[in-house]
Image (cartoon, coloured by chain):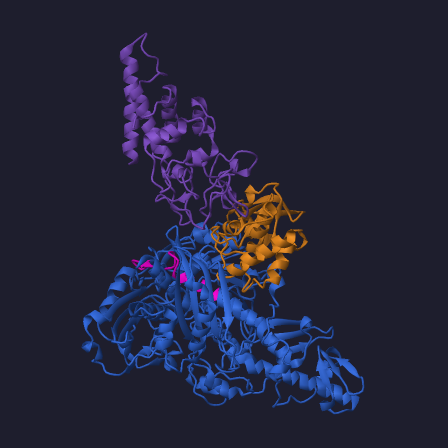
Chain colours: A orange, B blue, C purple
Amino acid sequence: METYKLTVNGQQKEVTVDPSTPLLWVLREELKMSGTKYGCGISACGACTVHIAGQAARSCVLPVSLVNERPIVTIEAMADDPIGHIVQNAWVEEDVVQCGYCQSGQIMAAVALLKSNRKPTDKDIEESMGANLCRCGTYVRIRQAVKTAAQQLG
Amino acid sequence: MSTASTSNRAAVSRRTFLQVSAAGAGGLLVSLYLDWPSIAQPSPGPKVYPPDAFVHVRPDGKIVIQVNRLEFGQGVQTALPMLLADEMDADWSQVTSELAPAADVYKDPLFGIQMVGGSGSIAHSFLQYRQLGARARTMLIAAAAAQWKVAPSQCRSDASIVYGPNGQSSKYAELAAAAAQFPIPEKVQLKNDSDLRMAGKKVRRLDSRAKCDGSQKFGLDLDLPGMKIALVAHPPVFGAKVKNFDASAARAVSGVQDVFELPLVRGSGVAVVADRFWAAKQARDRLSAEWDTSAVEKPDTAQLFAKFRGLAAGAGNVAVARGDAEAMNRIPEDNRIVAEYEFPYLAHTPMEPLNTTIRFDGDKAEVWAGSQFQTIDRIAIAETLGLKPEQIIFHTEMAGGGFGRRATPDSHVQREAATIAKRTRGTPVKLVWTREDDVQGGYYRPMHLHRVEVGIGDDGMPAAWRHVTVGQSIVAGTPFAAMMVKNGVDETAVEGTADTQYTIPHFLVSAHHPAVNVPILWWRSVGHTHNAFVMETLVDELATRAKVDPIAYRLKLLSPDAKKLRACLTLLDEKSAWRRSLATGHAVGVACHECFGTGVACAAEVSVEEDRPRIHRVTLTVDPGFAVNPLTIETQMQGGLTFGLTQLVPGGAITLKDGRVQQRNWDGYIPPYIKDAPVAVEVYIVPSVEQPSGCGEPPVPVIAPAVVNALFRLTGKRYRNLPLTDI
Amino acid sequence: MHSVRVGLFLIVISSISLVETSSGQGAAPKDHPTSSEALAAWQQVYSVLTYPRCLNCHTGTNYPQQGDDRHRHQFNVVRGQEGRGVPGLTCATCHQGATSKATGGANCAQCHQGADLNATGVPGGHGWRLAPLSMAWQDSNNKRLSPAQVCRAVTDRTRNMNMGGPELLKHHEEAELVLYAWTPGRRPDGSQRTPPPLTHDQFVAVTRIWVEAGMPCPQQ
């Protein structure tokens, strides 16, 4: 067990865990932040997507011991994020969600895309969202919602 | 739309999980067929459902509506409250919904158990929820009228306010307590179509925001003080037993509480209980267990297909036989098609891994689970804990998908959890199935082999059709068997073939149900998943041979009574004019199918990119009877199509070798990602005033045949084996 | 395969030693191997470069490969403009650096060697990315290029980020993503990924021989 100081959504947190614990489980069980989801544990589905130092990262394969001082941002911070809340509004407007379990990860991936590219083409959207799995099949509406969000970002 | 009572609803339901005959009190009739071990007959629930069990008007004006079945993506937590709120004249902006716990009053009015499945949510609870809303409104108005000393008929209601004849008004929140004292009216007048505000309109989901901001809790997110996490090492061959195990390395992991052998529904496993998920997982990975596989069959996919092929050479138990059995022999061989189809096991893999949390206190217990089968699960947990079901509080958690995986007649996950909870008595324990457990843990859509011989008449239509299907019976050994197995044929194996609405005069469908050591389960749309693929690809082949447009051919071949399919195909023809002018390298494929009372037809535009089908667009038409929420229907059609592609993508197969499942996770059993899904799906709903029928499953079966029908036009090949590994 | 290549390596090394001892004073010093020895050394280098641990990221397509069978990398990951993937799905999104011992910088892996930091089976190293298309060692049909073709690519300064012999040697000696190949970690199923047919030291040694001979390329 080791103690780690983490910056999560702008706040300092301290946790004491096994160094190999993936950040996903630190967020969910130590910090009680259940918005980031466990889907597969092998980075195949993206339900665990967070942002580390501004880049999308799959937290289920990231040992907490490798995070260091890099800031972590989770879905819980998206409502207060200038791009995050536009994406969430677009998701609600377009009635994207069904079961909703994958959507934290989908939104984090979409926000990462839009932070980097305000005018994504269809191909950009398909590539950036390409590894986020949705078993309910909301892909068609996700495509539309990303476009809607991009339009609103202007 | 008629205001028929519940009894007529039973008559309208076609193929459903449990067949019931048309007669009142559907619940009672169903319960006669169920053979539960410890309860003679589950009580069917009251005929007059009490509003106070379903709708709570809070003092602050918020209206909380209980949903009598699991929400796992299909939108029922919005659509059912919509119906109630509409009849109740509730202010929709103040409405929220909750998933009701297990209780008699929440049983499905038709099936007599609390469940979701068979695309039955709207179909079965449509009138129930409307009646509940009308009752609530009646009682609120009665309370207001009494206070104002006027007649109820002089009052009207709108947006959670009752208005009196002389300018009086009173909010529902103010009236609720008084209203509850009034007798519950048995008969209520439902609104006319023209007076409905929401039903029939696109209404957005109530749960969107919470699912977008991380605040929605699913079963896996449950966190209780002192809660432990449990994982179970399951046998690598189904039904095998633990021979011995060394827990020393597992116990050495910090946070591990307990490691012990655990009896399972079949065979045994080893449970690990720890403070945290990661500790439990590390510990389980370090268990060295030896398994006794001597007493169980070791299934092997290649061997099974060979065995199935052998069985298919002869007719099985007859599902349907009409016309002249010798007619085929009179048709020249040149005019016959002989086709063999192979379908693998399919895992459901809903996005949220399976989980159940239980706290056992000796004389009672509390359960939290995203269950599709609350009644059945609660009985199973009670059995395991030595309690009566009534001693168990069973909370229904929001579930991250299900597709049938959370509706297990043997409640095996719940039994595992209960067995562990017994040991952690007083402390809540959350059993988690990792994704590996899920992919390797069985309860798959059965593998099937079909052998079909079609004899084509001079008119280009099929005159004779001999169809043998081979696959395990899903309901054998479950309480559903009594009703769903007829003449040795499991109805789920022949739904979509035996009951086809295509006019085929000399028609024989039979089935073999070999026993295989692989646990199986429904999978969204069940038998239609493979049966529609066979029917729609063969009909397409016939249309091609006859040189007739695929929609026109189907319209010609369908019985005049196939009203929904006819309406869908006709609308599809109108809405898919684009199929007549496609880009080079693009082709269109058509398919139609009716299941769970709903007809669906689609046209898919496909090209080949990087050796895979690229689906540019799908136009889909659906006849679901009256469309309660057209937005839900649109999203279900879009989602269901994509779900149906699970069968088609190259990684869409569970295979076994020497008794072991060869896939481990989504890196071996690979579902459709955004690139595999259609880029655009347009949905057109056939206008209807008929009783609403289901929407969750009907879109699933049509996409795979539509895509391969399009591929034929590009490659000249007919695809008879799923998944599609080579084009 | 592995033992054959090691055997060939040993033959190369021992033949060089023979040259040294038999030539006596005034003979060619050991840092100028003959052309045929250098070409043989190149074959050894080539055997490592085209081993899946390296080849999987030196693709000529829009995507990386995975596994010893070099199948297309799952999950639809793509090259992106700089070979690092696309926003939202960069290589680093999943490949966070847990397997490589030489992850460099201030991170705990250097000290906490005992912890199993690669419990999930995703390989990694800082800066995980595809090699640029100019460094593709496969054609667009995923077929390995020949020793001659790879040699020409690797020595072409307009394609290899302007690296001369000494830089190439240093790259083979020290670059983190090169070093990854020798600690490639375990797969999700628990089995170990296979390292290239030479050890890292052997790889550096044959690279040195080849570089000091002026990096000759085979004719064909």
**Residue B642 shown in magenta:** yes
Magenta region: which residues?
B639-659
When the figure is inspected, residue B88 is found, relative to residue A92, above or below; the finding is: below
Whether residue B599 is situated above or below residue C186 in the rendered picture: below
The answer, for residue B283, to whether it is visible in the render is: yes
Q: How far from the left and from the top, in percent, is residue B697?
A: 45, 71
As drawn, B412 above or below C75: below
Figure check: C218 above or below B542? above
Left of B434 or right of it: where is B450?
A: left
Q: Position of residue B370 (x, y in %)?
A: 52, 68
Q: Is residue A136 left or right of residue C136?
A: right
Q: Can residue B233 be seen here?
A: no
Q: In the orientation shown, which residue stands out farthest toward the top?
A: C26
- The quadrant in which residue C217 appears is top left
> Viewed as shown, does residue B1 lie left or right of C61?
right
Quadrant the N terminus of chain A occupies: top right
**Total labels drawn:** 0
Q: Quadrant of residue C11?
A: top left
Locate residue A112, reporting x and y percent.
Answer: 58, 48
Q: Depth check: give the residue in front, B260 or B692.
A: B692
| Outermost residue, front side | B581
Q: Is residue B209 magenta?
A: no
| x, y percent for residue B122 | 53, 77
Of the pair B297 and B294, the residue shown nearer to us: B297
